Image (cartoon, rainbow, N blue to C red):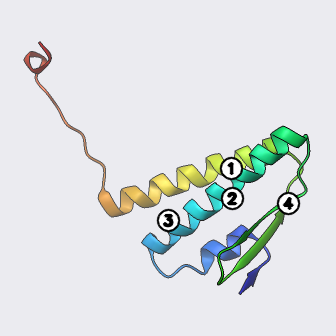
Amino acid sequence: MIYDSPELYLEDSTSIKDKIARIDTLIASMYNAADKAALTGSVDFYSIDDGQSKIQTKYKGVDAIIEQIKGLEKLRTMYMNKINGRVVTLKDRRAFG
């Protein structure tokens, strides 16, 4: 399947775990594109081809890629919290001495 945008790629996921896996794939691909952009000074697009689907997205530069990575990392954290929940551990101050 060929996707025109990362949004369509994420919308096509079947579960929260699948969505997290797709987000990880997008983030890894975007890091590669950001590296290329930082080293060459420009980037036209990044692409993902995992054998089952293809995505190609155009960007204006490194800043646009980094902003999307930050957004996806926040989204990934939100989905992970849905699966695992949030945990807070309270410790007595005597436990540190």
User: Separation of disc 4 and disc 3 at Cα?
Assistant: 22 Å
**Residue at x 60% of width, y 55% of height:** 72
Check disc 2 and give the amino acid type.
Answer: Ser
Under circle 4, the secondary element is strand
Q: Disc number at residue 31?
A: 1
When the figure is inspected, residue 78 is found, relative to residue 51, above or below; the finding is above
Q: Nearer the viewer, mark 3 or mark 2?
A: 2
- Disc 4 crowd rating (10 Å Cα; few below 14, some 14-19, many 20+) is some
| Residue 49 coordinates in the image, percent (x, y) | 71, 74
**Residue at x 37% of width, y 56% of height:** 81
Under circle 3, the secondary element is helix
Q: Are marks 2 and 1 in contact (CB under 8 Å)?
A: yes
Q: Are marks 4 and 1 in contact (CB under 8 Å)?
A: no
Numbered circles on residues, count: 4
When the figure is inspected, residue 20 is found, relative to residue 15, above or below; the finding is above
Under circle 2, the secondary element is helix
